Amino acid sequence: MEDAQGSVRAPAALCLGNLGTEGVLGCCYLVLVQELGNRSSDLLLQSQRWLSEMLPSAGVYYFPWEINSSIPEGEALRTFGRLSCYDLTRSEAILSTQHGSAQHHVHIDTTLVEPFEAQLGSLYMVLGEAEHREGESPVIKARILTCVEGMNMPLLEQAIQEQRKYFQERQQQMESGTS
């Protein structure tokens, strides 16, 4: 497809269709770059920020034993545990994890992920938002609830620790670079 100046541009619908849902942000950015041409890079950055704000947060990993009332309402988070209970009529599930000598339970609101085939005793990973209910520890309103049976849990815990270490070092570098 050609514009008034004779430049060839890919139509947005074709681009989105070829990249699928994983490539939507990149494709929208590509279309914006093509649309804006030689305009200011500030406008491009502003458009990129706008697009990233439209997508929900990827969520911060929390270990099940770290989930408590100090997590802000609505914060996106990820955690894991074995499915110990599922009540379809109430749209609630409980993920349980052993840490040291203590058993930890995370309550999940499954309204947005139903129907799903609950496999009691299997390992699950959840991505959702913290929701505070009176007199209870936070409930995670699940966006994604995936069975990950067979996942190497000690390796996952190590990876989460390494990711936290990396983010902390990067934050320190950014703070020292701006001061």
Image (spheres, rainbow, N blue to C red):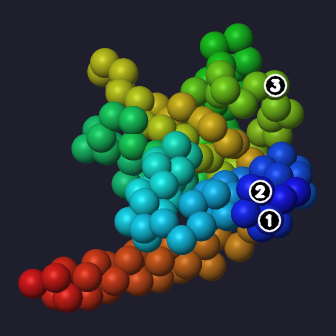
Amino acid beneath label 1: Gly
Q: Are marks 3 and 1 in contact (CB under 8 Å)?
A: no
Whichever of callouts 3 and 1 sits on the residue coming sooner in the sequence is 1
Q: Looking at the picture, does residue 21 appear above or below residue 128?
A: below
Q: Residue at x 76, y 25 (%)?
A: 114
Screen quadrant of the N terminus = bottom right
Compared across the picture, whether 19 is left or right of 59 comes to: right
The x and y percentages for residue 109 are: 58, 27
- Distance from Cα at disc 3 to Cα at disc 2: 47 Å
Q: Are marks 1 and 2 in contact (CB under 8 Å)?
A: yes
Q: Position of residue 34 (x, y in %)?
A: 67, 64
| 3 vs 2, front mark | 2
Residue 27 visible, this angle:
no
Instruction: Identify the amino acid type marked 2.
Output: Asp
Choose top left, top right, bottom left or bottom right for residue 118.
Answer: top right
In percent of width and height, residue 106 lies at 50, 40
Labels 3, 1: front one: 1
* Label 3 secondary element: loop
Residue at 36% x, 21% y: name it. Answer: 133
- Position of residue 42 relative to residue 125, above or below, is below
Q: Which mark is residue 115?
A: 3
Check residue 6 in the rendering and tell me which mark sits there, or answer none. 1
Q: CA distance from mark 1 to mark 2?
A: 5 Å
Image spot of residue 27 (x, y percent): 72, 59
Image quadrant containing the C terminus: bottom left
Label 2 crowd (10 A; few <14 / some 14-19 / many >=20)? few
* Whether residue 126 is situated above or below residue 8 in the rendered picture: above
At 31% from the left and 86% from the top, the residue drawn is 169
For the residues labelled 3 and 1, the Cα–Cα distance comes to 51 Å
What residue sits right under mark 2 in the picture?
3
